[in-house]
Every structure is written in structure tokens, then in C-alpha cells.
Image (tube, rainbow, N blue to C red):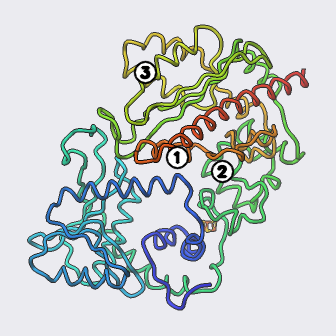
Amino acid sequence: MPTSRPTVNKSVFGASRECAAKGWFTKHVRPSRPLDAGARMRSEQGNLVGARARLLFPDGILISTSTRQDEVAETARLMNDGQVQTLFEPCFKAGDFIARADILTREDDGWHLIEVKSGTQLKTEYIQDVAYTATVARLTDIRLARVSLMILNKEYLLGDPLDSQFATLDVTAEVETLIPEFRAMMDGLPEILCRDSPPDATISPVCRNCEFFQSDCVGKEIIHPIFDLPRITKQQCGALLRSGWKSILDVSSSRLINQRQKDVLKSVKKGKMVVNGARLRDLLGQVKWPVYYLDFESLTVAMPFYPEVRPYEQVLTQYSLHVFAGPGEQQRHSEYLADPARDCREELAEVLLRDLEEKGSVVVYSHFEKTILEALAIRFPGIADRVEAVLARLFDLRQVFGSAIYHPEFRGSESIKYTLPALTDMTYEDLNLKNGQEAVAAFLELANGGLEHEVFQQRRKDLLDYCARDTLAMVRLHHVAMDILERHS
Ligand code: SF4
């Protein structure tokens, strides 16, 4: 599988810094895996932000040739041309290492390297990213005078002047500190990446968030890894691994730090559901009929679509509402999907408040709906009192599956992704949109415009079907929980 000499890019280098095996998998396994909807959307948003940042340098020249080799040559040629002031996406290669900068602009004492990021806050990973680019640039003898990160200004509103959309932060000192470490690490890395198989890997707390853990690496044979213990701390994780315990099945109950972890251990060891009857009774007793099962979808993007919207502001675009008078007694289903050409939040809120009437629990499955409702009350003070009344009726069904019921197939999570298939035969498999990220991407497609009428209508239907399935999933899970309580009474 591996090539004779690997080309190391920023993502392979970054992964290798975390773990040598992760670098190998990133180089040899990740490229064959399709990006999920969320990753594709982040990448598209990143490209839009990058293109927008380039507008700040009207004299810039975009390096865009057919091969990486040509890009490197073209970068060198233009940098040697004393007339060229700014380059976009210049490419550098030093030995086996390749790096592409976002912006390189000439200053009196050398070049100013700028990395554009679509976040609104300075992050350590951003500094590490640009430090990699700076290290490769230095190895090619480029005289770097300054290194900066350009991030989004979180106070920017669509319609504000272009230069207020970004904040440029000088990170030269931080990057200079990292360059010697990066250069030292580069020495042995190509040899590791050349191998036919990944380097030996040992399970550690880092594996918890590693995309290769269960598919390719040390978690392949572990059915219930200790990372599935709810609210496991880094300290506890390290201590359990030092004891040689990789699976929950190995763990001694005395080493668990909360009741939920003990319930999980019991459930996994017995291979069946564990119910905390008192807690379940207490929680379900809080639900008042009629019940309004409510789910929201929103648009959250780096580049706002509507006036007066900030980067990453949650713009509510859709809801589904199933209303039940009592167990098994469906009264109606209501739904709303925004016109993507405009910000429909106020109109949506008015329709929703009417649909929610005045009595009965509003059942949701996360904190998300609460957060959105609170934001609506602030944005539209005229409806704040009515929104407050709805907030007082909210019941988060997720807590039932996070504290009163545990099934081994929950895999340490109370997300619908796990609870629904573990407890019901309902799935999302027959839908065109199968998760929230795909739903956001579909709405974004509508908002971007240019779709043919039939495609537009199909996407709308997909979105309505997806959101309706979310509320039906809540209906099913609530009814399952009621049945479980009845069996435990
Ligand atoms: S699962 Fe752990 S050891 Fe394997 S690649 Fe990921 S971080 Fe490295």
C-alpha cells in the first residue's frame, strides 16, 4: 500500500504529532474514505472564507496549476519576481514535506505568512497548523518576517465593511517556539510513513477521540471500550488504562466514580438493559399531557446568509411538532420550513407559539431547543413572555436515557443515534437525510440558490421528512420509556 517516499502534508504531520500510528492511518487510510456531510460543509465554508479574505489583497495572484510540482515551481518563480506583492495559496516543498499557505505578502524585511481560519477564536491547533507551513517555508530558505492568523470577527454582521469581517493576529513568537520541535520531528517521520503497516500502537486517553480507534487500530477488538463510561474523566481514563483495563467488562466497580457508570457496568456485564425505576418514575411523572414533541433544525455557518446575522449564529429554519392528547393518542402534526431566501425566524416563532398552545409538556431531546428559544426571546422582545411560558413547559427526554435507562447498545451515549435502534425498530435508513449534518447541508443547498424546481422541492420534502422523523422518534422513545416503567412497577 505505501509508496516508496511519502509526501507529508499538514494533516498527516499534525496527526503524527498526536500519535505516530494516527499519522500513518491519516496518510494511507483516510484518503479512501468519503467525507461526511459535516466535513464537506466545513470544507466548503472554509473555501468561502478563504476567498473572502483574499478580497482584502486586491493585488494578489492565485497560484493554480494542474500539478503540485507546478504549483511549487510557480510559487518560486513569482516570489523571485520583485514586482509581485501578494500570492494566494503558494506552495512550498522541502524534501518529503509539502505545505500550502493561504496568503503570502511581501514586506520590507521579508514575507508575511497568513493562514486564514474560519473560526472566531484563536485555537492552539491553528497556531500548530501555521507553524507547520512556516517550518516548511523556512526549510526552503524563504525569509519569513511575520506569521499571522486571520480569523473571523464574531461581531461581524452581514452587510458590515469587508475589513471588519476578519481579525488578524500576529503569532510569530508562538510559531518561532514551535519550529525547532517541528524540524526535529521531521527527521524520522518519512521512514515511519513509508512502512507497509502502521507502527505499533498502544491504547491511551488520546484514542478516545481518534477516528481510527475502532475501525483500524487498537479498539478493533474491544466491544465496550472504557471510553464509553459516561462522564469518564481524563484522569480516570488514564488510571483504568494503567491498570490494564481497556474494556468496561474488565473494570472493577470500586473504580467507578458515579452511579451512572455503575449502571453501565452492570448492564454491559449482564448484557441487558438496566433501569433505575425510582429515577424513571420521577422523570416521567414530570411530563404533563397533552404532550408536544418538538424538534428544531437551524442553519449555522461561518458566512452569514441574512442581514443582521453573525458568523455561526444559530438561525432557526424549521420545526416539527407531533401533538399527543395521551399515550398513543395522536392529535396532529404541524411543521414549518423557512423560505431559504430570507430570515424567517420571527414568522416561524409566531407560528410555533400558536401551534404550541398553552398547556402540556413540550418534549425535546437535547438542550438545543431551549438555547434556540432563549435566543428568540432576546432577539424578539415582543414575544419574550410567550417564549418564557414555553420554556417553563420544556421536558428534555434525553435525561431519561442518560440517567434512568441504560442498554448495552447505547454505547455510552444517550443520543437518539444509539437509543432509537437499541429500543425500537425505527430507523432513518429509508430517508434521504439521515442525520442533522445532512439536514444543515440540504438547507444550505436551498439557501445557495440555483437549484432546478424539482430538485428544490425534493430537498424541501427531504427536510420535512427528516425533522418529522426526529419528533416521531421522540414519540416512540417516550412510549417505550413508559412501557418500561410499567413493567418495573
Ligand atoms: S486509536 Fe490511538 S493508537 Fe490508534 S491511531 Fe488513534 S490515537 Fe493512535
Q: Nearer the observer, disc 2 or disc 3?
A: 3
Q: Earlier in the sequence, mark 2 or mark 3?
A: 2
Residue that mark 3 sits on: 347
Q: Is residue 399 above or below residue 104?
A: above
Whether the residues at callouts 1 and 2 have beta carbons within 8 Å, the answer is no
Which element is circle 2 on? helix
Q: Residues within 10 Å of mark 1 (few under 14, many from 20)?
A: few
Q: Nearer the observer, disc 1 or disc 3?
A: 1
- Most foreground residue, 482 or 262: 482
Which element is circle 3 on? helix
Residue 136: horizontal and vertical position, in percent? 33, 78
In the rendered image, which quarter contains the C terminus?
top right
- Most foreground residue, 192 or 67: 67
In the rendered image, which quarter contains the N terminus?
bottom right
Q: How many marks?
A: 3
Residue 260: horizontal and vertical position, in percent? 74, 37
Q: Earlier in the sequence, mark 1 or mark 2?
A: 2
Outermost bottom residue: 4
Residue 210: horizontal and vertical position, in percent? 60, 61
Which element is circle 1 on? helix
Q: Tell me the quarter of the picture where residue 474 sits.
A: top right
In percent of the image, x 72 and y 44: which residue is there?
A: 418
Q: Residues within 10 Å of mark 2 (few under 14, many from 20)?
A: some
Q: Amino acid at mark 1?
A: Val
Assign ligand 1 to one image quadrant. bottom right
In the image, is 85 to the left or to the right of 139? Answer: left
Residue that mark 2 sits on: 236
Q: Amino acid at mark 3?
A: Glu
In percent of the image, x 61 and y 51: which residue is there?
A: 235
Residue that mark 1 sits on: 455
In the image, is 4 to the left or to the right of 85? Answer: right
